[in-house]
Amino acid sequence: MLHNPPFHIDGSSGGNIYGNWNAANYEAAVRRVLTRIRSTTSGRALANSIRHRIEIVPYDFRNRPNQCDAGANIRPPRTVFNVSRAMATDVFAPATPTRAAITGQGTGSGSQLQYTPGFFVPGSRLHCIDPGPGMAVDEALYHEIVHAAMNSAGAATPHPLRGFLQHFQSFDEYTAVIVTNVFSSETGRDLRGSYPGTTPLHDPAGFYARNDNAFMIGRVCRLMPVLTRELARVPCNFNPFREFYRASAGLTPHSTRANTRGTSLPF
Ligand SMILES: [Zn+2]
């Protein structure tokens, strides 16, 4: 997925705003992607759920030298106080040699997104990330905004996942991938089934009833009711949030296959 970074940053756009590394073109490119996101029901649902400031800046190669990527951070400064506001109230991260213990406060925080649109646009001078499910220029930004929405809702849960869901790495990445899949479904594109990586989602129709997904989607809905109730109304084929709220209302039976491992939670 990750390739060499674009060293050839010379300011000439080649007629493509996504390929030009200067401030005006960067801003124009990001605005164009945001406009596309806001033209969709799932994009408006995401935007409407955010209560804290989001800053979007170009990707900083000092984070991971020689690798193109995108990312979301708690709004700087990344203090224990700010991180605790972003994290859900039932989340506790023990102290490490470099960091104090953090108890989630759930009150929400702002975010800084590192995102360079040209990385994701084939044909752009800056293109350096392989295409694949969820990796289009707007899907990549949508994914990062989901992280910002989690920080804003005080829902961040950076715990690793295990068992059936370990290919999503953490609860936060699971949420970012699955919510972005609703956007991808609304806009008629392939769905992503792993993080990192771009494995296609296997059997999207059976997703909600499979493994621990009903439990996981239930947690996402409890942590982010404003976002997920709006998402449930998005008219698209893949919509596990619609399935959760329909099940909650007794409209379809709860899956008996979900969380069959009893009290063993996936994180
Ligand atoms: Zn992510």
Image (cartoon, rainbow, N blue to C red):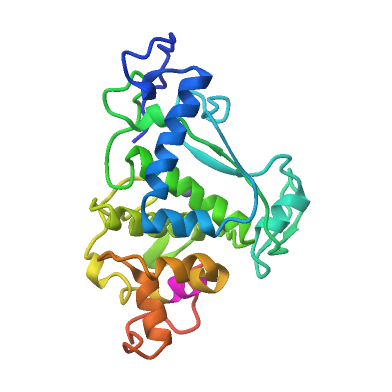
Q: Is residue 253 left or right of residue 82?
A: left
Pick whichever, 102 or 237, lies toward us: 237
Q: Is residue 164 left or right of residue 110?
A: left
Q: Quadrant of residue 179?
A: bottom left
Q: Is residue 93 above or below residue 74?
A: below
Pick whichever, 109 or 170, lies toward us: 109
Residue 148 falls inside the magenta stretch: no
Q: Is residue 187 left or right of residue 263?
A: left
Q: Main secondary structure of the magenta part?
A: helix
Q: Position of residue 69 (x, y in %)?
A: 45, 34
Residue 216 falls inside the magenta stretch: yes
Magenta residues, as a range?
215-219
Q: Quadrant of residue 7?
A: top left
Residue drawn at x 44%, y 48% is: 143
Q: Position of residue 76 (x, y in %)?
A: 70, 40
Q: Position of residue 54 (x, y in %)?
A: 60, 44
Residue drawn at x 39%, y 10% is: 12
Q: Is residue 187 visible?
A: yes
User: Which quadrant is home to the N terminus?
Assistant: top left
